Image: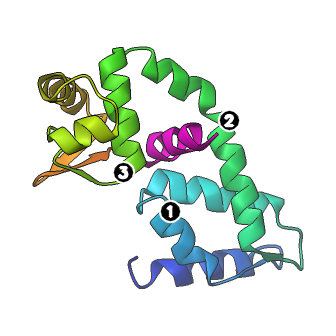
Amino acid sequence: MPRNNGKIIQKAMENHANKAIDPDVIPLVYHFWDGVTLYVHRIFHDAYAETQAGETCTEALIDEVTSSFINQNEKRLRELLSFVTDQQKQLLYAIAHEGKANGITSGAFVKKHSLKSASAVQSAAKRLLEIDMITKTGQTYTVSDPLLRIWLRKMLTS
């Protein structure tokens, strides 16, 4: 996290309406959302709105706001998934499950995630890369949008 960002966020909350923020939650939010400004700003905006004057924004409040934000976006995320094939969805789920996936066409990865075949994975990955749903850095694949990744992981565990 850039060094001054946490102090900026903390000062903004303290200077308005006598609200404070637990300094430990600032890097948690930043890293949870991979530093994506849109999401970091939204979570702090909503947490600020929920924090009463004279009180401190805590990790528990951040968790509530984050959960609410994810739930608010569920319909849009489901609609987004409706535009990809079942094989592409299965690969997205597998990458989300891993967080950072390596060797996605290997027999071990295909078997572990019950994917159709290495060639099907390769084809699905090519399309998901084209539409920017996944990102490839070196040989590592990740779900491009942190909100989508978090929601997919939530879907896998519920």
Q: Nearer the viewer, residue 90 or 74?
A: 90
Question: Is 105 part of what is drawn in magenta?
Answer: no
Q: Amino acid at mark 3?
A: Glu
Q: Nearer the viewer, residue 146 or 85?
A: 85
Element type where label 2 sits in the image: helix
Q: Residue at x 16, y 39 (%)?
A: 107
Q: Amino acid at mark 1?
A: Phe
Per the image, the residue denoted by label 2 is: 72
Per the image, the residue denoted by label 1 is: 32
User: Residue 95's spot in the image, x, y percent?
Assistant: 33, 43
Query: In the figure, 16 relative to 50: above or below?
Result: below
Q: Earlier in the sequence, mark 3 or mark 1?
A: 1
Q: Measure the alpha-carbon separation of dots 2 and 3.
A: 25 Å
Q: Which residues are magenta?
A: 145-158
Relative side of 82 to 156, left or right? left
User: Residue 23's spot in the image, x, y percent?
Assistant: 63, 84
